[in-house]
Image (spheres, rainbow, N blue to C red):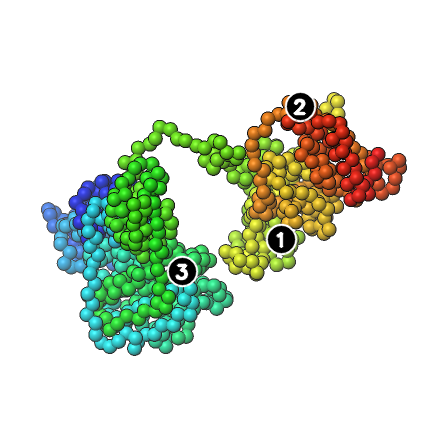
Amino acid sequence: MLVSYQWLRDYVKIDVAQQEVAEALTMLGFEVEEIQDLGKRFDKFVVGEVLRREDHPDADKLSVCEVTTGEGESRTIICGAPNVDAGQKVVVALNGAVVPNGGFTIEKRKIRGVVSNGMICSVAELDFGEDADGIWVLPEEAPLGMPFASYIGAGDFVFDLSITPNRADSLSHIGIARELAARYEKKLQRPEVKIKEGGGAAADHITLDIRQSDDCPRYAGRVVKGVKVASSPDWLQNRLRAVGLRPRNNIVDITNYVLMECGHPLHAFDLNEIRGNKIIVRRAAEGAAFTTLDDKERSLDDRMLMICDGERPVAVAGVMGGQNSEIADSTTDVFIESAYFDPASVRRTARKLGISSDASYRFERGADVENVVYAVNRAAALMAEIAGGQVLEGIVDAYPRPLEQQAVRMRFARASMIAGVDIPAAEQRDYLQRLNFELVAEDADSITVRPPSYRVDIHQEIDLIEEVARMYNYDNVKPAGSSRLPLHRDAAPDELSVASLRVKLRGYLRGAGFNEIITPNQLDPASAAHFTDNPVKLANPLGEELSIMRPSLLPAFLRVIRHNQRFGTRDLRLFDIGRTFSRDDEADVFIRGIRERYELLFGICGAAESAHWDRQERQVDFYDIKGHVEAMVEALGLRKISFAALSERPVFLGVESQLIRHRKQIVGYVGNLAPDMAEAFDLESPLWLCSLDLEAFFQAPRKTGRYEAISAYPAVKRDLAFVLDTATAAAEVENVIRRQGGPTLQELGVFDVFTGAAIGEGKKSVAFSLLFNSPKRTLQDEEVDQRIAAIVGAVQKQFGGELR
């Protein structure tokens, strides 16, 4: 945000060098990215007068102008603007001047045989607007020879500030002046508004009907009649230009001026275009079209808040006005809107429509609901003064459920501890009061205050502590030479916690030999049709091949596999992490009707082990991909993750597949790619996949890592082989063995699976290796035998298994 130093000093009387102000703002939490010297920017630009104009003898569209700047002889300047003429006051760039919009230096040069000494400038070339069709013609009273910087009042410095999203209160000159007033212990001088009302009641010309009070808690307005739309006075235009805004006309310029002054967005309607003399705040009709001020037709949905008159929409609430009620040269009566809109509603609408305006930027961060009336009164007073209008009596103001700031308690000792320096309680209280926090209660240990209405970012104790710390000045906090962390707990302290699961997940896969691929979120309709009949379609896609938001990571993943196989790389280990999109009209989601899932897809194909003199090459199989899943679960320290048979296979999986679940919730699948899918994507070898819904997967509880000493006592190893039905999952038998094995069962695994005539048709033999141990004593054979007997009995009872 651009902030004029001269403008700031209208509200806080400080006599400090701009560099010191920049340092103070930085310590207050507002990073100063640049300090612009406006006077230096227009060095060697002066006010001149065109004495004579003639056609160029060798160019149809060029003029040869004799120009004076008030001193010495006149100069010849070649000009290509169609509107240049004798008698005009103009902006002249002398030799050596650097043109702001373009950065080139003016030099004496010959143009089609005629020497030109300087340039007559347009608004666009001076970076004051977009009008590049002609030169900037100044008023006749512009002083000849005056430096252009002095003429526009540009002996000013402009701070380019980076305002954090939580500090909506500082998106204005008064907001920044308020901070400097607290810093330098000065009084804030907000302009006093005096309005001479007359001409009848405003309520007789406009009525309000707020139908969505949740999205619009407050809506107010004033009526100004008999205005004359014209150019703004120089001082107003210069103020707007200094902060990067292009002057338009006095009415629109006043609303922009008030926005930059006090931070509250306003909108001016042509009152005679408001049909039915009423304003209705309601939701848009689904699919309705509306043309905004930028001459673009927008498609609306039924979640967007609109400002309507008695017949039609006239503005997108908090975002942009409509072309059908804009201020025109013929406008005589104005309705000024000043409202408070819900930040989430404005943010959603602005993003959906692809609009980022000065108004939406502020509303979506949180405006000051108590600033509504001041802003509209300030604009009305300026319109009466500048545009000659009559402000009608009264203000229309709908505020059915007033919003109130909640009091917040802060402990003095806590603030000192967080800041890292001992700040006396009285000093802490003084800081908060200088920032206009209302004192509610105080005792020896704490203070309770109510934030001002414009501080929408203050909700809890830590917010107040931050205010105290920044007012104390971070430079006054000396770094400590050491720190203390609690190391006596079983789990690692928060200060030393491990990286997030997502980072660990990527780390495991990379360490296991996988390469990450990054694929686009969009794909073609034919690929999407494998997964859904109702895809999420883009309204304005770059092309048909990118017209669908992907319902699965798989199509793009398979194309990467195919591409690599065609170039001779067949042993592949790849993974992709990204979002998928599906229709869901019932879920509570950010974009209504569209559910986003964060998913992982990884796959392997080719050789598991390359050929060697002592072994044959082996191709990857189901147990390789499942082994990766198990190792990944172990590396992430997740519990309650298990595998189970599929009752219904997803379209992309073959027969050798299982589901992955956390307790009873399905979190993913593992298995082989379905043959018809492999054929559709023209793959050359079998592919084994794992697909996980990461948000559900990460809900699994995590193991608590802690140190355990290695047992000093001997272990007891036993092997058990059971004859089971072929449909019985070994994992289910493992679960039973673990439960019956008790705490001394330290290790358990399958070491052999056998099928054949000796076992019987429909049967299989599964052999388990068991290791028992105790960290406290030597186990006796009798107690291990008891555990073995319990295990055998439980397997026989639950699965009909027979001990071999």
CA gap between label 1 and label 3 equals: 37 Å
Mark 1 or 3, nearer chain start: 3
How crowded pointer 1 is (Cα within 10 Å; few <14, some 14-19, many 20+) is rated as many
Circles 2 and 1: CB atoms closer than 8 Å: no
Looking at the picture, does residue 554 appear above or below residue 131?
above
The residue identified by callout 2 is 713
How crowded pointer 3 is (Cα within 10 Å; few <14, some 14-19, many 20+) is rated as many
The residue identified by callout 3 is 342
Mark 2 or 3, nearer chain start: 3
Give the residue at x 54% y 40%. Answer: 502
Looking at the picture, does residue 277 appear above or below residue 797?
below
Q: Position of residue 208 (x, y in %)?
A: 36, 72
Q: Tag 1: residue type?
A: Ala
Which of the numbered marks, if any, corresponds to residue 528? Answer: 1
**Which callout, 2 or 1, points to the residue nearer the camera?**
2
Q: Tag 3: residue type?
A: Asp
